[in-house]
Amino acid sequence: MKNLLIACVAVLGIGLASPLAHATLLAPGTQSATADTFSITSETLIASIQNAALAPPGGSVGQTIFGTYSAWVYQEAGGTLDFLYQVNSTTSTTVVNRITASNFGAFTTDVGYVSSGPLPPSASSGGVLPGNGSDTIDRSADGNTVGWNFQANGGIGAGANSVVLEIQTNATLSTAGILSVIDSTTSSNVAFEPTVVPEPSTMAIAGIGALGMIGYGLRRRKALGA
């Protein structure tokens, strides 16, 4: 039983905390004129959505945004996750001025774009860079929404694409999320977002409960065998 307890504690401890290697964190409620630049050379792709059609903003009537998007999740060597996105505006009738990703409130974020090295599968090379004076990148006051702004560079018009955008985090798990593509309307699309690892106390309680059930089963087997 002692060895079993040690093994359970070791398993429960995996993934509870991992450091994030980044240049400049984007704190909740702040904006920056500088988007960090990244490379995915040493990272591992663990999930992707490639070349999916952008959802009609508010339905097909009066639709102005047409195109595709891709989303990827990469894992760094230390186990932390990076969330990448790219939007291709094929025949939009207005320019895309802003792209946001949601539900990052529980995590640290380093925000920017991929500037060198290999591209994710199916990604387009080059693209419009985020840039809009002091708020090139921004994060909402509650930390949930991270955004890139493209107005200063003319927006993302028909036939153009964004660069591959990236959010580095200290998360170790991901789930389904939302990517918003915005002109005067908003196209909301299924992508990826980080999710919280259960609290250590919750996991410990679950582990103790499991050990209790194992102990009960062993005692019952002994009693039946007597």
Image (cartoon, helix red, strand yellow):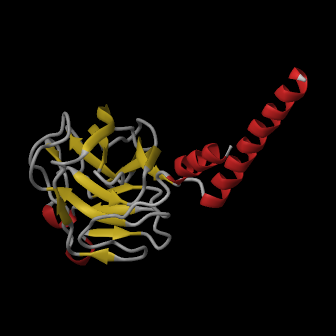
225 sits to left or right of 5? right
Picture residue at 31% right of the left edge, 59% below the top:
168
Name above or below for residue 204 compared with residue 222.
Answer: below
Where, by quadrant of the figure, is residue 189 drawn?
top left
The residue nearer to you, when weighing 40 against 217, is 217
Q: Nearer the viewer, residue 29 or 198?
A: 198
- Which image quarter is the N terminus in? top right
**Residue reaching furthest top?**
225
Residue plotted at (40% across, 60% down): 18
Q: Is residue 222 left or right of residue 89?
A: right
Q: Position of residue 159 (x, y in %)?
A: 13, 41
Q: Residue at x 72, y 43 (%)?
A: 211
- Quadrant where the C terminus sits is top right
The mark tally for this picture is 0
User: Does residue 222 lie above or below 164 as drawn?
Assistant: above
Q: Is residue 131 visible?
A: yes
Give the percent coordinates (x, y) of residue 190: 42, 40
Quadrant for residue 217, please give it: top right
Horizontal side, residue 27 vs residue 155: left or right: right
Where's residue 21, x and y in %?
28, 65
